[in-house]
Amino acid sequence: MSDGILDEAYERLHRTGPEYAGWLSNHGPMAVEALARHGHERQVHRWLDDYLTRLDELPRGLHPIDDWRAALGDAKRAGDWLAHFDRQLREQPWRDVLGTWWPRLLPGIAAGATHGVIRVGHAVRALHLHGANPPRLTELGQALGYWAARWQPVPGADRLLAPISSGHPGTVGPDVVAALAGVPRIDDQSGGIRERLGRLVGVPRWEPALAALRPARTPGEAERGLGTLVHRAGLDYLRFGHAEPVMLVHAVTAPTAVLRTLPALDRALWAPSLAAAWAATAAVTSVYAPSDAVAPPSVAAATPAEVFARAARHGDAHVVKLADAVLDAHATTGDQRLLDAAGYAVQLI
């Protein structure tokens, strides 16, 4: 990976806002980080030349963030949030800023259709692998600012994020596969994600299904649970992706972003991080996946490098980011079906 090309791409993107055309997320920083990470630096600027034409200017601030709790989720304060984190990251080490704000932002993991946390995950990976410099710090600040401005909880998830008591005898760790299989579907799968998430409140089986994931008792359990969540969601894309090819990508990329961020966090934050990622994946599954699965499609076998190359040639940011996520999961599990999920996205999107 040429971090110089990534930094150049960041500098071009940091003149643009976190959203465009209403409230569509700016996927540029996430996609270019994935392209550079997997050795496709030569495509980065060509890809950006086209993508930049659709983006809006960086929003201006109104006034400094003073009461941060009141300003969470106020999209009109996006410019203020971007300026706030820019100052924070100039004054403090980035890990300290992340450690302070991660638990504040985590309950609002649905922000921007989960793109807030996804963008943070890509930014943290760049910092973790290549060190801090102004473009990478600016990217983390813009990612955190976007998350704060669009902060949105998953209905019912507040109970999952409460401190874990000691009264859970017999708990042996989270059973992610069984919990995800039990997620109900909303009846009316129309409209945008904000409208769909609001309908979860009226689903009687939703909160019991959300609570079905046993809490992680140790950081190690949390890390393994996140890995299993990404793995299972990737396989579910093969079964359900035909129904909502773009939006169901986020059931995979959101927990991947959380998993990538763990090494930069205090280990005490790992268990609530799993709980929040679980809530995000469960919610996206509930509001976008059909009740009935289809047989997994036949996808031509390929190596991880070939899988990502196909995604890069396709060029859609969601295809690129899904390939990036499943390559991570494949490296851990060796499950070829994860690579098939990326190939399926190339066919669908």
Image: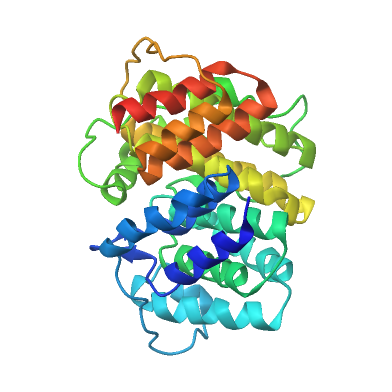
Residue 346 x %, y % = 36, 29
212 or 148, which is in the foreground? 148
Give the quarter of the image for residue 54. Answer: bottom left
Q: Name the residue rendered at 44%, 41% in the picture.
A: 320
Can see residue 250?
no
User: Which residue is pictured at 62% across the width and 55% down the height?
Assistant: 2
Residue drawn 54% across the image and 24% down it: 232
Along the horizontal axis of the image, is 235 left or right of 294? right
Q: Which residue is the extreme one toward the front?
A: 42
What colouring style does the render use? rainbow
Name the foreground residue: 86 vs 282: 86
Horizontal relation, residue 71 to residue 5: left or right? left
Question: Compared to 87, does 324 lie above or below?
Answer: above
Residue 136 appears in view: yes
Nearest the viewer among 131 and 195 is 131
Q: From the viewer's perspective, is 74 left or right of 35?
A: left
How many discs mark residues in the rendered view? Answer: 0
Q: Is residue 87 above or below residue 188?
A: below
> x%, y% of residue 153?
45, 54
- Horizontal and vertical percent for residue 84? 53, 81
Could you tell me which residue is drawn at 29 percent across and 61 percent down? Answer: 23
Name the outermost residue toward the bottom: 63
Q: Nearer the viewer, residue 195 or 122?
A: 122
Above-or-below relation of 297 to 62 = above
Location of the C terminus (image quadrant): top left
- Asked which quadrant contains residue 319, the reply is top left
